[in-house]
Image (spheres, rainbow, N blue to C red):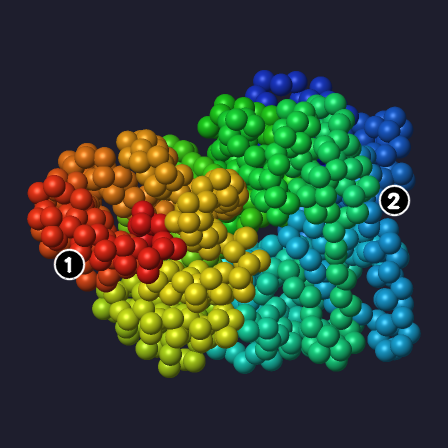
Amino acid sequence: MLPTVFLSLSGVDVNFVANVERNIPPGMAYFYPKSFENGENLISAMEERVAESSIFVLFASRASVDSVWVQFEIERARLNKIQNPRFRYLVFPVEPGVDREKLPDWMREGWVPSAGHTSKDIARYVRGVLASMAEQNGTVLPPHGRGGLIDKARREYQNATFTNKVAPSVFLFSGHAGIGRRTVKRLLIPVLFPARPEMDYGPEFELPAHADLGDIYRAVRQEMEEHFSLQKFESAWAAFNDSSTDEQVDEVLRSMCHFADLGQAVTIVIGFGLYEDRGELKPWAATLLSAAARYDQLKICLISGRQLKFKDLRPLQNVQQVNVEHLEAPDIRTLILETIPIFGGTPALPNDTVIQSIGGHPTVARSVARLIAYSGPMVVDGDPKQLHDIQEEILAESLSFDRLKPIECDILSILSWVPQLNGQMMSEIICNHHGVDQKAMVETIEFLIAGCLMQISGANYLISAPIRGMFRRKHGYGSTELRAIFARFLKAEWESAVKNDELKAELFDAFVYMTALEGGTLPKEFKGLLLPSTLQDLVRDAYDRRHIDDHALDRVVAWGMPAIDMKMDENTREEILSYLLRALVRLGSSDANDVLDLIKDRGFRSAAYLEAFLIRLTGGNLNDAVLLLRDARRIGKYMNSVIADLAICLKLLGRWADLDTLLQEEVRRVDRNPVLLDIRIGILVAAGEFPEAEREIGRLRAMPFDDGRADSRTATILMNRDHDFEGAYQLLTAVLNRQTRGALGVRRLRALAAARGKRYEEARRDATYLRTRPGGEDTYQRIEAEIALAQKNYDGAEVARRKVRAETVQDRLLGARILEARGLDIQTPLDQRQVLLTEAAAIRQANRSVDEYDFD
C-alpha cells in the first residue's frame, strides 16, 4: 500500500489545510472534514487513522498548539512512533509567532521551518516525503542496474567542478520516454547533495513534448503563487510575450529562485522542446542554460528526449548531461520477477527472445510482468513477431480491455482525453461513477502505476504520450456516457474557477481539450490564456481524428486559424499551419493556397512537402509533386510523410524503377512505416507472391496506425488469388463496422469488391457516399465503370473510365480489363478480338508490378 499522512490541525486553520490536502494525491491524506464519516466515533476514528498513517503532520498555529484535540492526536502519534520506528512526524508553522516550546520535546525534532509558507509549498514537501517513504517501505520497487551510471555521473560532477572551478547547477537527463530518466535523477541528486535532503522535494513540471519557455513560465508561476489569479495571469502572460528573450529568461529564473530559497531543485520534463526540428538549440533554451549560471543556489533538472550536442554543451560549464541508456538483460529479468507479485502472480520469466525484444526498457518490462501475472509467460512467449514489433505489441496487449477492470478502463480513458488531471478531480469522478470509496480508487491507481500505464506528477495523474496514442488507437475515445459526465464535471469546475478568479492550468488545458473533443470552437475569452504548445497538440489531435470524425477537419481549421496571428515560436507556428493547410486541402478549400503562400513567405522548411501534398490531393501534376518531394527529402522535415507520399506518387505514375530504388534506399523506414510496407505488400501481391505478402500483412497488422491496411490487403489477396469477391466484401464490412481509421480507403475497396461481386446496389451506395469527399468524383466514376464492365456494358464502362480526371495506373489496368472482356466476348467480331487482347497485354506488361485492386 502507498504511505499515507495524517493532517492534524485546529479548526481555525481548516481552509489553509484544505488547500494543502487538495494538492496531495487522493487517498493519501487523512483530513477530518473529508476522511471521517458521519456518525463515526471521533476519538476512535482519530486513533484508527493515526495508527494507519505513515506520517503525522502538525500544522502549528497558536490555536493548534493549545487545542485539546490536537494534543490527543499528538499523543497517539507518540505511541505510533514507539511501535513503528519508521513512522515520521513533521511540524509546519503556518503563522508567525507560534511557540515551539508548547510542543512535546520529542515532537520539536520534527519542526520544518524551511518548507515554505504557502499551502502548495507544504503540500509539495509532504509529497516528497511520501515518495521517499514509498521507496524505503518497498511499496515502490527499488531501481535496478543504475549504480554504474550514478557512479559515472558522480565522477563527472566532481571532475567538472575541479576543472572548471564551477559546480554544475543544471542537470540534463536524456533518453527515451520511460527508460528511467526521472529514476536516475531521483538517485543522483541526493548523492551529489547529501547535506541538502530537501533538494529532491522540489516541483516537477510535466510539460508538452514540444514545450517552450512560456510553458515553463506558467508552470512556475502557478506553483509559487498561493492564489494563481486567472485575470492577473492573462495580463502577465501578455507582458511576458511582449518581453525580449533575455527578459523572459530572467523572469523565469528569478521565479524559480523561490524554490532555490527553500533548498529545492526544479525538475522540468521538457520532452523535445529544447531543439528546433532542424537540429539547432532554440534561442531561449541557449539563453536559459547559460543564464542559469548566475544563480548559484538554483538547481534545475531537465528531463529531455534529446541530448545536447557537443557544440552546444561545450560552452556551458554549468550544465552536466546524463544519458540514461537501456538496462541490461539480467536487470530486466530481476525487474520482471519483482513486479509480478504486485499483481498477484507467481514469478516466472519469458523466453530469451522476449527479454531481448524488451530492449532494456523498464516500462515494457513491467508491462510484460503484468501480462505474465494475469496469463502466464505463454502470453508473450507464443508471439513470434519481429523484434521491432514486440514492444508495441506488448504495450498494446497490456491495454486490452479484457485485461483491464472497468474502473481501470475509465481512468485510462479520461487520461487519454487530456494532458493531465488533478488527482482529486479524477477521484471524485471515478468514485461517483463506479460507486467505490477512495481506498478502492487508491488501490487501482497503485496497480496502474506499478504496470507503468500511468504516473503521478505532483498532485496530477497522467499517462505518457505513447501510451495515450496507443490507447486511442486501440479503443478510440471510450464511452460516450463517461465523456458526457467528464465534460459536465469540467464545465462546472471551470465555472467555479472563473468565479473565484483562480487559474488551474491542468483544469484549463483539460477543459480546452474536451471542448475541442466534443466539437466546440475556441472561445474568445480563452485566446489570452491559451499556450501555443497546447494549441499545437489540440490541432494535431483533431487532424488525427479525421478518419473517425466527419467534422474533425473543420475543427482543425477553426482552432488552427488563430495561429496565423498569435504570438508564438515560429517552429510551433509552422507545425500548426502544416496541419491547417492539410485540413484545408482535404476540405477542398481555396484558402489552402493562401496558407501555402504564408508558409513559403516565412521560409518554413515544410513548404516543399506541403506544396506536393496539395498537388497530390487536388489532381495536379504528380511529376511536379515528385520533384518537390525530392527537395523535401533533402531538407529532412516530416521524413516519414515525405517518403510515404513520394512512394505513393511514384506508384500512381507507374515509375516502378524509381519506386524500387526508393524502397531499397529506405528499407529501414519501410520496415517501420505502415504506408511504405503497404506499398511493398501491393508489389508482392501483383507479382503473385502471396505467401510472402501474407507474412508481411502479419507485420503490418502489428504496427501502430495500421488504419485497416492489413485487412484491406487480405481482401485484395482474396480478390486476386481466389476471386472471392463476397469474402472480401464481408471482411471489409467488418473492418468498417469497427470504425477504424482509414475508413475511406476501406470503403473504396469495399465498393470495388461489391461491384466485382455483382452487389451493384451496395457498390453504388458506397460510391455515392464517397462522391461527396475530396477526390470522390473519380472514385464514383471508377465504380460505375466496374459495374458497367460486370454487366458487359463495355462502352459504358469505357465512358465512365474516361471521366476520371486524375488517371492512375489502376485506371489503365481497368482499361486493360475492359479490352480483355471485350476481346473474350463471343459477341465481339472475330477479327477484332486478338487486336483487343494484344492491346490489353501491352498495358499489363507495362504495369506488371501493380496490384489492380490497389485502389488508392
Q: Is residue 604 above or below residue 217?
A: below
Asked whether residue 122 is in view, the answer is: no
Q: Is residue 398 above or below residue 589?
A: above
The x, y position of residue 317, in whole percent, is: 79, 76
Q: Residue at x 18, y 52 (%)?
A: 834
The amino acid beneath tag 1 is Arg
For this rendering, which residue is in front, 587 or 64? Answer: 587
The quadrant of the image that shows the N terminus is top right
Q: Earlier in the sequence, mark 1 or mark 2?
A: 2
The amino acid beneath tag 2 is Glu
Q: Residue at x 25, y 65 (%)?
A: 619
CA distance for labels 1 and 2:
90 Å
The x, y position of residue 599, in whole percent, is: 38, 75
What numbered label is drawn on residue 802?
A: 1
The residue lying furthest to the front in this view is: 831
Q: Is residue 745 left or right of residue 68?
A: left
What numbered label is drawn on residue 109?
A: 2
Q: Secondary structure at mark 1?
A: helix
The number of numbered badges drawn on the structure is 2
Q: Secondary structure at mark 2?
A: loop
The x, y position of residue 350, in whole percent, is: 72, 32
Q: Is residue 240 left or right of residue 750?
A: right
Asked whether residue 354 is in view, the answer is: yes
